[in-house]
Amino acid sequence: QLQLVESGGGLVQVGGSLRLSCAASGATLDWYAIGWFRQAPGKEREGISCISPSNGTRYYVDSVKGRFTISRDNAKNTAYLRMNSLKPEDTAVYYCAAIIPICSDHDQRYDYWGQGTQVTVSS
């Protein structure tokens, strides 16, 4: 059973940076695409980024493109989301999720989810 645990969230100033980690256990991430999602207060969960298996194709939603970078290290069974130039609207709980075999725009198709890590950007 694949388990995912996010870490690295916290309180940062506007314009600051943060790196989130998604550590997997119970199974290898090699065959999974990894997506990052976020849910802000009063809003629906939105997909913001995804990376294909074997460190392949990367996708970003327009609102984070150029600021966020998704990566993975299959040897460490971990995925990452580096966030730069953070804005107050980035404040949300951030989740990682896994899906076989490719990235999807629909969160319902992801099979495994972490419990989330809080990111708060002060203004």
Image (spheres, rainbow, N blue to C red):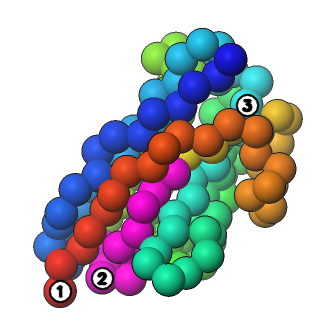
SS assignment at label 3: loop
Residue 45 locus on image (x, y percent): 61, 69
What residue did someone put label 2 on? 88
Residue 30 locus on image (x, y percent): 69, 21
Q: Residues within 10 Å of mark 3 (few under 14, many from 20)?
A: many
Mark 3 or 2, nearer chain start = 3
Q: Residues within 10 Å of mark 2 (few under 14, many from 20)?
A: some
Real-space Cα separation, disc 3 to disc 2, in angstroms: 31 Å
Residue 104 locus on image (x, y percent): 80, 54
Residue shown at 26%/69% (left/top)? Answer: 120
SS assignment at label 2: helix
What residue did someone put label 3 on? 32
| Amino acid type at mark 3 | Tyr
What residue did someone put label 1 on? 123
| Amino acid type at mark 1 | Ser
Real-space Cα separation, disc 1 to disc 3, in angstroms: 36 Å
**Extreme-bottom residue of the structure:** 123
SS assignment at label 1: loop
Residue 88 locus on image (x, y percent): 30, 82
Left or right of 43 on screen, residue 69: left
| Amino acid type at mark 2 | Pro
Residue shown at 24%/61% (left/top)? Answer: 17
Who is closer to the viewer here, 41 or 106? Answer: 41
Image quadrant assignment for residue 14: bottom left
Image quadrant assignment for residue 56: top right
What span is colored magenta in the figure? 85-95
